[in-house]
Image (cartoon, rainbow, N blue to C red):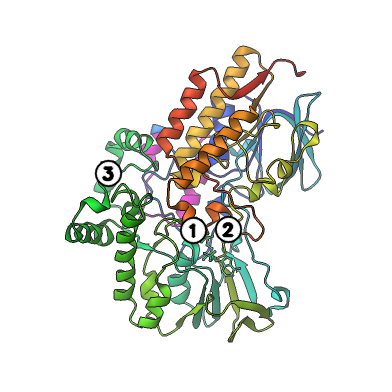
Amino acid sequence: MEGDYDAVVIGAGFAGLYMVHYLRDRMGLDVQAFEAGRGVGGTWYWNRYPGARCDSESYYYCYSFSPELEQDWEWSSKYPEQPEILSYLEHVAERFDLYRSIRFDTRVTSARYDETANRWLVTTEAGEQVAARFLISAVGCLSAANVPDIAGLDSFGGDWYHTGAWPHDGVDFTGKRVGIIGTGSTGIQATPVVAAQAEHLWVFQRTPNYSIPARNFEMSPEDTRQIKARYPEIRELARNSYGGFPYRPVDRSALADSPEERETHFEQLWNEEGGFKFIYGSYSDLLRSEEANYTAAEFIRRKIREIVRNPKVAEMLCPTDHPYGSKRPPVDTNYYDTFNRENVTLVDLRASPIEEITPSGVRTRDALYPLDIIVFATGFDAMTGALLRMDIRGRNGVALADTWAGGPVTYLGLQVPGFPNFFTVTGPGSPSVLANMPLCIEQHVEWIGGCISHMAEEGLATVEADETHAEAWVDHVRDAAEATLFIKANSWYVGANIPGKRRVFMPYPGGFKPYADKCEEVVANGYEGFVFSTAAAD
Ligand code: NA7
């Protein structure tokens, strides 16, 4: 055994960094974090693909726990690029002296609960083993890359990359024939940037997506000054909102406006605001009423037809098989316009699916596309993938993979029955990816820290989600999802992108504020739904 800690934290992204800071510096615990990457950043460490930037606005996609940090850090633009967010997280790690508590280049491969000792035994890829009383997963919701199992990939003579494991020294597309597979948020961000460099770019599209222009801009000193002066109000708005975004609540149905009023409203959001405001700051029922949703979907389809000059290509880009926002809504800079370029071709995989990859390129049912580089923008085994690729075993050696064989079971996305003293930051069943991630992370970290403090005060040895409460929470998540249009799409929210994955809606769609209220209520009711013991040896 190479260490015995109060807590082991897995991951050093937004979640892991704050978890370490909170447990170590606010609560005085002995904490060790393990991180597979060579640096901090998590998502922002791995996703270095061209065009990678945040779809949430910089002024709220950041920590709120330190007013000094909030005041000191300067964001360059509305939507910062990946290197800037990574610099921010590196700054946080330095500022709060977190590096000394993180072991890098160290992937956790298994964690087993030893009931007699009340310890989690955590093993790394190099075979090192440490023990800890608490095990906290901060592995992120979108960190297990999904490279589709396409016949012949091994034979490809060129280079291929997944966007979520991008080379640190970049990829030069100059003079290359490039194929991007996937038109989710990532493919949509990468396409215009790669197109500007490549000799020719083929975009392999299985499902067209609804994308809203980002309308990015550089922050002027005056923008920054105003935001900094308003931070308490901004955070308050975000904490009281559905999505964790600091937008003024809208309670108007899209159907309450006349077609002309709606058009004016959508035009203003499309042309001036851009980004998530189109969905979260426009009307209250875009994700609840098919009729209301249709008005937004039609507006976007009209925009696509306006922007893309070739009508056939425009039709191929128009989504019709799912409501707007039922898949994670992408935000772009010049995505649709890129298809007006001479050196860009859209390939419709619905009409002609990929059959194999050959030494020279991608072969669909109807054609062979000779390529030098293939970019897989094919997403992630979301929400459960990164947890399940570790062998996590709770009481009686039961594997998390078995407990979750029918889909993830958690109470509030925080704990799994049968896995004492194991917490998941933004686990399945929490709002996580449906809300502003840093805000969700802070709420989780503080809840977990509060629970551990409570245990110390009361002399409690273990905490574990009660099975009945966890099952009721899973039912509640499902019911909440069924009341929305989210379930109308084959999205990664339901695991549809991973062949064989059980179709379960994983994030909690009831809203950030109701969720955070529920977590507080649980505490006020003596941690209702959590079972504590004093019995385990400690
Ligand atoms: P997404 O949103 O999961 O998008 C992946 C894309 O790749 C999507 O267009 C998929 O089509 C496509 N895909 C996946 N597998 C295949 C295969 N086998 N063949 C062809 N096309 C395929 O991942 P992103 O990385 O774009 O975004 C993930 C999240 O990161 C994003 O939502 C933000 O939260 C940040 P499909 O739609 O499944 O037909």
Depth check: 93 or 312 in front?
Answer: 312
Q: Quadrant of residue 449?
A: top right
Q: Is the C-beta separation of discs 1 and 2 under 8 Å? A: yes
Residue 342 in view, yes or no: yes
Q: Is the C-beta separation of discs 2 and 3 under 8 Å? A: no
C-alpha distance separating marks 1 and 3: 25 Å
State the image coordinates of residue 4 (x, y, percent, origin top left): 75, 28
Residue 17 in view, yes or no: no
Question: Is 37 colored magenta in this rendering?
Answer: no
Residue tagged 3: 250
Magenta highlight range = 68-96
Residue tagged 1: 489
Horizontal relation, residue 40 to residue 255: left or right: right
Residue drawn at point x = 36 percent, y = 38 percent? 241
C-alpha distance separating marks 1 and 2: 9 Å
State the image coordinates of residue 47 (x, y, percent, origin top left): 54, 58
Q: Which mark is residue 213?
A: none
| Local crowd size for mark 1, using a 10 Å CA cut-off: few (<14), some (14–19), many (≥20) | some
Q: Secondary structure at mark 3?
A: loop
